[in-house]
Image (tube, rainbow, N blue to C red):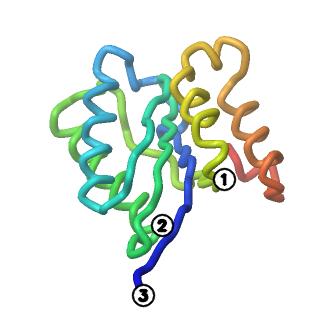
Amino acid sequence: MSTYTQILYQIVYSTKDRKPVLKEKRSKELYKYLLGILKNNKCHVYRINGIEDHIHIVTHLHPTVALATLIKDMKIASSVWIKEGNIFPGFTGWQVGYGAFTYSIKEKDRLIEYVKNQKEHHKKKTFKEEYIELLNEHGIEFDEKYLW
């Protein structure tokens, strides 16, 4: 028998110290780079987007891929790529942690639209407000002092 899974993730992580350095002018290059890493790990990517201080990735993980390892690899490789190419001046790295939230496949289209519209969404809500809302929506207990 084959292995069948449907694990839809929204992965969220920010720049170190929430520095707003991911300028829109070159952000598509970053998303393309991350897309390559995800595809090399046999992940199906639905959407990558973000704003100046964080990114969102909507993806299905291949069953052989460990989430923590994938995110570590994405952060390390993209940090090196950004710094060596001076893609985003002032970029010093990614935050230590990340958020990874699972969704039903029935929510896929809504989630893709949400991530697609990050720029508009963040005219009304800060990253902190958004992140706390995600944690609450998914029933994740947290201590706010460890979020920032």
What kind of element bears circle 2?
A: helix
Furthest-bottom residue in view?
1
Q: Which dot, 1 or 3, sits closer to the camera?
A: 3
Residue 38, x across and y down, in percent: 32, 53
Along the polypeptide, which appears first: circle 2 or circle 3? 3
Towards the viewer: 5 or 131: 5
Query: Can you tell which quarter of the image residue 76 is in?
Result: bottom left
- Give the residue at mark 2: 68
Residue at image location 69% in from the left, 24% down from the top: 126
Q: Does 3 appear above or below 133? A: below
| x 39%, y 75%: residue | 64
Q: Is residue 12 left or right of residue 74?
A: right
Q: Amino acid at mark 2?
A: Ala
Above or below for 125 versus 142: above
Give the percent coordinates (x, y) of residue 62.
40, 66
Question: Which mark is on residue 104?
Answer: 1
Say which quadrant the N terminus sits in: bottom left
Which label belongs to residue 1? 3
Q: CA distance from mark 1 to mark 2?
A: 20 Å
